[in-house]
Image (cartoon, grey):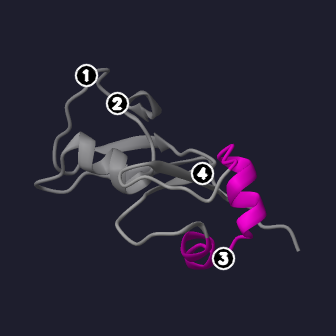
Amino acid sequence: MKINIAKEFYYRVRKGDEINDICQSMNTSRENIAFDRGKPEILPGEWIKVRVNDYMTHIVKPLDTIDKIAKRYDISTENLKKDNQLTTEKLYIGQLIKIYKR
């Protein structure tokens, strides 16, 4: 069975939302948000179009290992290493690891 993942969708801005917070929670960047008014500011109740990436980002925390990250996202360690061009098991705190949706 093939599952299609939406590449873009609409999000309704809530009171207190900030653009950077939306980008982080949606795994996207400012460039991937389309503003109806053409201005990079948001208003509560406004709908914005968000284009998402084909991957999620994991920030390495203390005690994270390749095995633990792979298990958490239900992917193989081989794919995790290949997708991130990792040649060793060594990870660094704060390192960004891409988790591709398959």
Q: Which residue is mark 3?
A: 74
Q: Where is mark 4, residue-wise?
A: 55
Asked whether the beta carbons under mark 2 and mark 3 sit within 8 Å of each other, the answer is no
Residue 40: x and y in percent read 25, 26
Bounds of the magenta span?
67-87
Q: Categorize mark 2 by other alpha carbons within 10 Å: few (<14), some (14-19), many (20+).
A: some
**Residue in the image at 42% along x and 27% along y:** 31
Q: Amino acid at mark 2?
A: Phe
Residue denoted by label 2: 35
Comes first in the chain, label 1 or label 4: 1
In terms of image quadrants, where is residue 90? bottom right
- Residue drawn at x 74%, y 70% as measured from the top left: 76
Residue at mark 1 to residue at mark 3: CA–CA distance: 39 Å
For marks 1 and 4, give the one nearer the viewer: 4
The residue where tag 1 is placed is 39
Split into 4 quadrants, where in the image is the C terminus? bottom right
Label 1 SS: loop
Q: Name the element at disc 3.
A: loop
| Residue 4 visible in the snapshot | no
**Residue 50 place in picture, x, y as percent:** 45, 43
Alpha carbon distance from label 2 to label 3: 34 Å
Quick check: marks 1 and 2 in contact, CB under 8 Å? yes
Disc 1 residue crowd, few under 14, some 14–19, many 20+, Cα 10 Å = few
User: In front of the other: label 1 or label 3?
Assistant: 3
